Image (spheres, coloured by chain):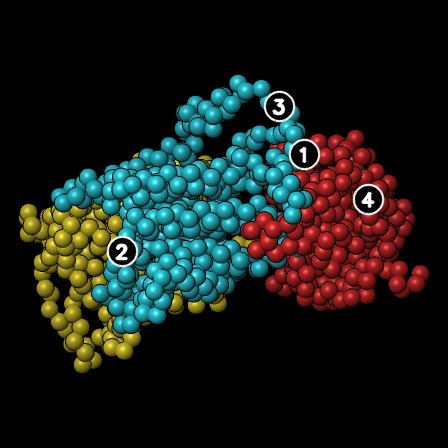
Chain colours: A cyan, B yellow, C red
Amino acid sequence: MKRYLSLAKNHFKLSRNINWMLMSVALVFLAIMSDAGLLTRSFTGLLSRIAYSIILAVSLQLVVGFLGELSLGHAGFMCVGAYIGCFTANYLHTVIDSKLLVLVIAMLVGAAVAMVFGFIIGLPALRLKGDYLAIVTLAFGEIVRNIFKNLEIFGGAMGLKTKIYKPSELFIIAFIVAIFTIIFIQNLIRSKHGRAITAIRDNEIAAKAMGINVTYYKLLVFIIAAAFAGVAGVIYGHFTTPLLYTFFSYNYSIEILVMVVLGGMGSIHGSILAAIAITVINFLLQNNLSGDLAALRLLVYALILIVVIIFNNAPALKGVRARFNIRSFIRRFSQRKVIRPSLRYDDSAEWNQIETKIRMDEILTADLPHNEIYTPDPREKED
Amino acid sequence: MSIIMDGLSLGAIYALIALGYTMVYGIAKMLNFAHGDIIMVGAYAILTILTVTGNPLLGILVSIVVCTVSGVVIEKFAYKPLRGASPLAVLITAIGVSFFLQSIAQLLFGAKSRPISLPYLGHVTIFGAEISVNTIITLIVGAIIMAMLTLFVKYTRTGRAMQAVSEDRGAAILMGVNVNGIIMITFAIGSALAAFASLFYLMQIPSTSPTLGSMPGIKAFTAAVIGGIGSIPGAMLGGMLLGLVEKICLSIPAISQYTTAIEFSLLILILLVKPIGILGKKRREKV
Amino acid sequence: MAEKDIILETQNLGISFGGLKAVDDVNLKIKRRALYGLVGPNGAGKTTVFNMLTGVYQPTTGTFLLEGEPLLGKTQEQINRKGMARTFQNIRLFNNMSVIRNVLVGLHNQPEFKYNPITGMLRMPAYYECEYAMRERAKEILDVFGLRTERNNLACNLSYGTQRKLEIARALATNPKVLLLDEPAAGMNPNETVELMEIIRKIRDDFDLTVLLIEHDMKFVSGLCDEVTVLNFGTTLVQGKTADALSDPEVIKAYIGG
């Protein structure tokens, strides 16, 4: 035990774990505020939405950013988890008194069922690449929606009535789940299994030649991502009622993908920030532009999306980006500090740095001209 | 019989849209998610001209012009700056453009769907089955357009340049092909086809709404993938197949409500058997 | 020569792509701890032989055996685990990973570094123990190639010659019995080539390896290999001791194109 703690302490690096630690601090703070009655109902609702968006974005990041497969069906997994989980919860409420226990069981059930579907969708992923897989995942999402729409036991077109939580309670649970999601996925990525997954993304042929079981890892990633999406679905089901199939359209899958892309491929920090940003933007637009101006909401959202993507990706704007780069900004600040020789053993930098940036074109089309090699920023080194 | 004719005419609509997807994919290597919304733009153009002048033919012409122009403008402002950037970024931009078009339509015409009155052309009876003239026009015009497109790509200078760009963009540049021009022409043709698709679509379902294009867009995209994305005959075949399946499923009461699920399952099944679509070209990665 | 000294053997190995016989009737017998060369003009089918031996392509005729065990029909992953590792003609490193992580991926299947994904997710003690041990092992392997100091650099930022060395290091990490090197000296300068020859000899001795390599640099082949097989148009032209085979008139004719 002592050795375990010392190992764990040696490999712990604040900047690599800052995401969930900050979230935990924020959660404690917000929970106290909420307890004191300082938070409005709509604000705690926003917090719940942020929490499940983070779960969705981080789990999709595992598929898109780390495994390098494009999935447009994440909302489909969420849909399965939500319907089955909430259906279970509705039944459990008649048997079990504790609301929290019911929610936890519902999440586990939702995750388990979503895992089964993750496995099913993972199977074509073994044969298909790029756009073809993207359309299959998209098709999967639409199939799931179409089926739940027509199943009467799930409420059919009227939607499934669920017992919703008070947002002021739900957001705490949702945040805890989100924090665990981040920790689990981050730890997975920073283990040898994560290395195998990123190896498949970087060069599948070489990964196979190194004896990496590509089948196993692709299925594993799809199953894990689906499980977390299922959990997010259950949280969503306890946030709104009735649970309607229309919510889980491919537009929502795409919204999750937007979070992943805006946050940066292969960056967990980034997807968390983007999930928060997009949820907040949506929330603000929804609250401030209602009625006749509802169309403006979509317009503003679309413009933000187009401008941000063009600014972040247009080859012509490379110089501009270099000047306004947050990372170089941070570096300029941090360089003022004298870099002390590290007390940790010399691989701690290596140990933690796995959130590598990737060339996104490899995800969509494997056969693009490989003239422009994308070189990630040089990382900090400690030895 | 009438089901098959209906299916084929719906298939022709899907094929026309799918051609837009597949050509843009072949030339620019991008999924143009906004393509479905071009149909919506075309539909509103027809609606506007019909209400103002009452002349359907003028409406069709204007709709073709509007679609073509908006296709080219979108390419110029949203996609061209991203030439050479990652396809995923382009994909997201296309989604942004799709939202953008929908919101503009919503601002101009309101969120509600609006009926549109195209002249009714009556029925004819063929082999004892009543078939509307609209269906027949759709089929015939669709076939002519597709034949012309095939000839254009095969036998004209521009068409051959398009083939070259889709085969190997780098080599095409070295051979002096104006790639930007070709991409623009591709968008123009794809959007013009979408204008025809919007007309035929309105002949079947005579009402417009800002989200009119998204479902046919996705279905047509599915059709393009079924046929093998990047392949022009593939898009036609996939479109026809999907249209037939849709109409047949809809005509059987027991499964009609699951039509969407069946169509998409068909896609998954076909891809599992043939991962590159029915007529797709296989690219072997060199080891 | 006793049969059990043969580590890798191919019997009538052949493959055709749509009627074109890319490789036909190749019979190799490679002795344990040999440095064996596979040479021939461009398009002779050398890399195709490698691809068949590593399971990328399935041979249409013949079979191949590693230590007497037929490996025909096995997947690339399985073949690697049976003890055959390779490098690629066009370098295939994991470009977005650091040097040491490339080697760590190679160590992935070693039985002493096993832990399951749940252990990794929850960071149980086995995770730390294994990861620590893996890094130590990876650094030892990098030492062989003089790459220890480069270990935190991204693989894509290395020079061409260094990338080739890293590819060998990564293949070595999978603990192979037979190492297949596809043009290891391509793109290297003369000094690097000489250094590479030393390294290959050293790893053969230290890791008890058999090396099968494809190379166009005849100095490299004759300086390193004990035996060679010369392929031309997919068929075996000459087989035997390096010096004899390379001075064979047939071989010279194939290269010069008489």
What separation in Å lies between label 4 and label 3 (alpha carbons)? 38 Å
Callout 1 touching callout 3 (CB < 8 Å): no
In primary-sequence order, the first of circles 1 and 3 is 3
Q: Chain of mark 3?
A: A
Q: Is residue A253 left or right of residue A204?
A: left
In primary-sequence order, the first of circles 2 and 1 is 2
Location of mark 4 (residue): C203
Question: How many other residues sit within 10 Å of disc 3, few (<14), some (14-19) or many (≥20)?
Answer: few
In the rendered structure, find residue A345 and report the number of the disc placed on it.
1
Tag 3: residue type?
A: Arg
In the rendered structure, find residue A240 and report the number of the disc placed on it.
2
Location of mark 3 (residue): A340
Tag 2: residue type?
A: Thr
The answer to whether residue A167 is visible is: yes
Residue at (35% x, 35% y) in the render: A308
Secondary structure of the residue carrying numbered label 3: loop
Callout 4 touching callout 3 (CB < 8 Å): no
Instruction: State whether discs 2 and 1 lie on one chain.
Output: yes
- Please provide percent x and percent y for residue A77: 40, 59
Secondary structure of the residue carrying numbered label 2: loop
Secondary structure of the residue carrying numbered label 4: helix
In this view, the residue farthest toward the bottom is B128
What separation in Å lies between label 1 and label 3 (alpha carbons)? 13 Å
The answer to whether residue C49 is visible is: no
Callout 2 touching callout 1 (CB < 8 Å): no
What separation in Å lies between label 2 and label 4 (alpha carbons)? 64 Å
Q: Chain of mark 1?
A: A
Q: Is residue C213 left or right of residue B77?
A: right
- Please provide percent x and percent y for residue B115: 11, 57
